[in-house]
């Protein structure tokens, strides 16, 4: 673990940019920097989801591991993007595996701490959700297209 | 008050029917994927093939096995070659995709309206290709890269189902090494052997580097992918009249006389296959049009 | 062909616009003059309980004294009491049977060692007289002229056949139960597009034809045919016939703004309703004089040394018509009915600059379940009006 970032540094990440300095400061107090080497596991499906990740550098793959088939990568995410929303939604368990597929630097925010901050600052909390929901909507659209197997025979 | 047509005088030689093909021979065949091959053809009875515009197509057949509409996927400047990338999907294309060097191929055309390139001068360009949709876009890419200084930023996003379904792989690697254009390649799903991006092309649009209101976009791929991509581009400020899509319908004649390729009021062989998203957006939403 | 000469009675060379009267008893002379000028004649004839088009060798081949009763899904022949030669409307055949045959070879390719050569099909330029062409049919022929010869690619087979036609039009003396040419602006009056036109006049002791010359080709045929110059009474009687026909149309179709109306209603509930009745049997597209959709196929010889390319009629009602490698685009009957009707009445304007419908009523008559195009158009128009007034009704309230 390395030193906590400041609210100003968090403001540089596209997902958090523009939230109030007060909230960013509060989030910063719950945030640490972490580095993952290539291949390192960030989370496993089913594990308790306690952290929200913002990618600063590198690449993270979201994977599914069916019991009877090889591991399947369903999404890769890069700098400026976010990983994990199960810290916000019960039962707070990871729904996919997350793995670094390149040397990756992330900001890690404590999930329950983040929930408390959003509860205490409802206006900024709402703005936070307004950023998170479109990210999930875009991924949901994409997943639907994947189900359609549009490139299929 | 005349019933007669003002055409050739009676008794003249039969006119060359517009449906008469020209003979070509296969020079080379490359297997792109398990079901897709790229063929390089040369005309038999002349040195150069007819000129074509990026986005146009030919009606192609191995005589006797049926005709198919195939987009031209080669370089417009290489005038002695005619290149197709064919996926074995039906009887005619199965025969074509398996054609080896020396095979005689019957070709008609080119037909159709191609990609409008001139309107992109001085602007940013976004090219979004899904699956085999990269084939009709490749001639456009050759032209853009040949005249690179005419355009602003160039972003190319190409996605296929799996890494094994990517076409033009060696060329993709060369393009990705360029510093004057950004090529992103992604797949819908992958195993451990893939170190690149995973996720649909539409996911790459929000963060792609272009100035929306000053951008022209060219899309080709499954219709639903083009629809979602166009919406994502619009969300970035690209104007609908600057988004161009290449549509596909059953084609038989290629010359606007058989009625098969209708898409709403458009005859795709004559008014398309490249059309403006502004014109076709409402039609794309109608089921079974 | 014989050069224009003198006719039997007045000694004048018939000029374009010339009108004369031909007695019923002299009608066979007209037929033989046409034949003598080198034309094979095709025209209406009774076969299998309908008036179809076939070879006409003599007057008796025509449906003398017959008429037809047409309604949605119904066609019956009945006897007339006046012995009229053209006292009926149109049957299941149209002239596209000859100009755009149901099966046609386009070319033959001959394989060589490493290539092939193409032998185009020799054009069929047999001079043929079409006898009894109605106004709606002239309009239909012109529509197909535009499809096959009006674009960048001219179909040589169609062009050759078309060039050799001697078009002998007939003014309709009555309107049929499913006729609506007046609504489409295509009739019932024949005004141009003919070499000769005939208006039959029966009654009051007379049985004769007002003959009008449309072209020099038509004039040349009249050589030797006994005619007397038409007077004002002949002309006004013929005009009255046409006027009577205009007023007795079986149906109407409001074409006001119909292009935007149909292209703007792809989700109209009527498509699903009519789709439940429609059998997708393709009768309408076969009977329609303007439907041109066709397929091409390749026919190799047993040893594959030659390959013929053929064209055959197809129909947008066939499931495979819109087939892509992923499946058909129009999988439901409602989507195919919508395609046909929208193309015929709306998209045709975008593609060819006119309506595709000439109001002949064949699709209504020959539909086995009696679907009526004019009723469908009416329903969709009223559905659109209902939506429009529902949208504005809240504004109107105080």
Image (cartoon, coloured by chain):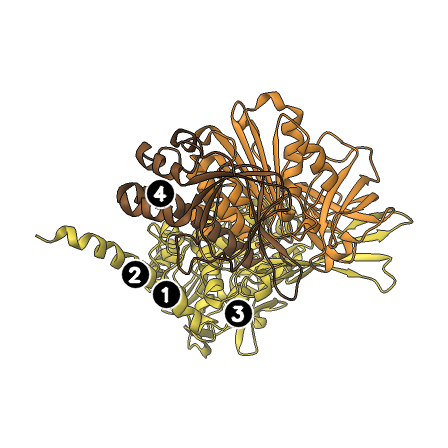
- C-alpha distance separating marks 4 and 2: 46 Å
Does residue B45 appear left or right of residue C163 in this picture? Answer: right
* Residue at x 62% of width, y 62% of height: C313
Do the residues under discs 2 and 1 have CB atoms within 8 angstroms? yes
Label 1, residues with CA under 10 Å away: few <14, some 14-19, many ≥20: some
Residue, disc 2: C383
How much space separates mark 4 and mark 1, taking CA atoms?
A: 47 Å
Query: Are dots 4 and 1 on a single chain?
Result: no
Look at chain A in the picture and name its colour: brown
The residue pinned by badge 3 equals C283
State which chain disc 2 sits on. C
Q: Tell me, what hue is chain B?
A: orange
The answer to whether the residues at label 3 and label 2 have Cβ atoms under 8 Å apart is no
Colour of chain C as rendered: yellow
Q: Residue furthest right?
A: C113
- Between C373 and B244, which is closer to the camera in this rendering? B244
Percent position of residue A83, x then y: 49, 46
């Amino acid at each position: 673990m390395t030193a906590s970032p400041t609210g100003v540094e968090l403001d540089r990440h596209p997902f958090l940019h523009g939230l109030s300095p007060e909230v960013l400061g509060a989030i910063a107090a719950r945030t640490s920097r972490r580095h993952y080497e290539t291949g390192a596991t960030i989370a496993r499906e089913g594990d308790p989801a306690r952290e929200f990740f913002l990618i600063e550098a590198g690449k993270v793959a979201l994977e599914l591991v069916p019991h009877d088939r090889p591991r399947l990568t369903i999404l890769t995410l890069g700098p400026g993007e976010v990983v994990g929303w199960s810290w916000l939604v019960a039962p707070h368990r990871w729904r996919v595996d997350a793995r670094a597929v390149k040397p990756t630097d992330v900001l890690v925010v404590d999930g329950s701490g983040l929930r408390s901050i959003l509860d205490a600052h409802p206006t900024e909390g709402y703005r936070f959700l307004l950023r998170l929901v479109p990210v999930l909507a875009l991924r949901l659209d994409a997943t639907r297209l994947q189900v359609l197997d549009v490139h299929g025979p | 008050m005349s019933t007669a047509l003002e055409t050739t005088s009676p008794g003249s030689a039969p006119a060359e029917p517009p449906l008469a093909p020209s003979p070509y021979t296969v020079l080379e065949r490359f297997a792109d994927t398990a079901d897709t091959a790229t063929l390089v053809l040369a005309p038999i009875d002349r040195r150069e093939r007819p000129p074509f515009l990026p986005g146009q197509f030919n009606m192609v057949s191995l005589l006797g096995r049926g005709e198919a509409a195939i987009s031209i996927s080669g370089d417009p400047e290489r005038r002695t070659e005619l290149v197709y990338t064919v996926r074995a999907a039906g009887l005619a294309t199965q025969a074509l995709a398996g054609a080896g060097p020396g095979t005689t191929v019957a070709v008609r055309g080119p037909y159709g309206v191609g990609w409008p390139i001139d309107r992109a001068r001085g602007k940013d360009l976004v090219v979004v290709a899904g699956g085999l949709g990269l084939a009709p876009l490749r001639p456009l890419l050759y032209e853009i890269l040949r005249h690179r200084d005419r355009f602003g930023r160039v972003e190319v996003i190409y996605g296929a189902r799996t890494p094994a379904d990517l076409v033009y792989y060696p060329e993709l690697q060369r393009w990705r090494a360029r510093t004057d254009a950004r090529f992103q390649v992604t797949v819908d799903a992958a195993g451990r052997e893939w170190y690149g991006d995973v996720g649909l092309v539409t996911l790459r649009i929000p963060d792609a580097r272009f100035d929306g209101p000053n951008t022209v976009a060219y899309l080709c791929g499954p219709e639903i992918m083009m629809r979602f991509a166009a919406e994502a581009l619009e969300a970035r400020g690209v104007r609908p009249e600057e988004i161009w899509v290449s549509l596909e319908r059953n084609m038989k004649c290629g010359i606007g006389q058989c009625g098969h390729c209708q898409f709403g009021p458009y005859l795709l062989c004559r008014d398309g296959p490249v059309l403006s998203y502004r014109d076709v957006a409402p039609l794309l939403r109608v089921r079974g049009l | 062909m014989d050069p224009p000469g003198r006719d039997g009675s007045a000694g004048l060379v018939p000029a374009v616009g010339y009108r004369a009267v031909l007695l019923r008893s002299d009608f066979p002379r007209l037929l033989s003059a046409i034949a003598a000028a080198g034309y094979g004649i095709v025209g209406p004839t009774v076969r299998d309980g309908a008036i179809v088009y076939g070879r006409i060798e003599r007057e008796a081949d025509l449906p003398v004294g017959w008429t037809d009763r047409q309604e949605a899904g119904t066609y019956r022949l009945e006897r007339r009491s006046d012995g009229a030669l053209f006292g009926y409307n149109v049957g299941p055949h149209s002239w596209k049977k000859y100009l755009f045959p149901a099966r046609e070879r386009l070319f033959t390719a001959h394989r060589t060692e490493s290539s092939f050569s193409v032998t185009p099909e020799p054009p069929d330029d047999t001079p043929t007289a079409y006898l009894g062409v109605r106004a709606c049919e002239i309009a239909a022929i012109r529509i197909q002229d535009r499809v096959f010869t009006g674009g960048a690619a001219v179909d040589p087979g169609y062009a050759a056949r078309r060039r050799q036609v001697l078009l002998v039009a007939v003014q309709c003396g009555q309107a049929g139960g499913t006729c609506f040419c007046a609504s489409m602006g295509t009739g019932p009056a024949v005004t141009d597009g003919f070499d000769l036109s005939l208006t039959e006049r029966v009654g009051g002791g007379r049985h004769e034809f007002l003959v009008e010359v449309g072209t020099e080709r038509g004039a040349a045929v009249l050589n030797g045919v006994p005619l007397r110059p038409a007077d004002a009474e002949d002309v006004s009687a013929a005009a009255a016939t046409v006027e009577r026909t205009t007023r007795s149309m079986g149906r109407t179709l409001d074409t006001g703004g119909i292009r935007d109306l149909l292209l703007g209603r792809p989700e109209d509930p009527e498509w699903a309703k009519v789709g439940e009745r429609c059998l997708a049997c393709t009768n309408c597209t076969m009977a329609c004089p303007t439907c041109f959709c066709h397929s091409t196929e390749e026919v190799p010889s047993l040893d594959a040394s030659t390959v013929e390319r053929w064209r055959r009629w197809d129909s947008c009602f066939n499931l495979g018509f819109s087939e892509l490698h992923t499946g058909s685009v129009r999988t439901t009957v409602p989507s195919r009915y919508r395609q046909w009707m929208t193309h015929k009445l709306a998209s045709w304007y975008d593609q060819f600059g006119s309506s595709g419908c000439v109001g002949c009523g064949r699709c209504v008559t020959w539909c086995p379940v009696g679907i009526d195009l004019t009723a469908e158009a009416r329903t969709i128009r009223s559905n659109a009006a209902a939506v429009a007034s529902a949208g504005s009704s809240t504004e109107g309230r105080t």
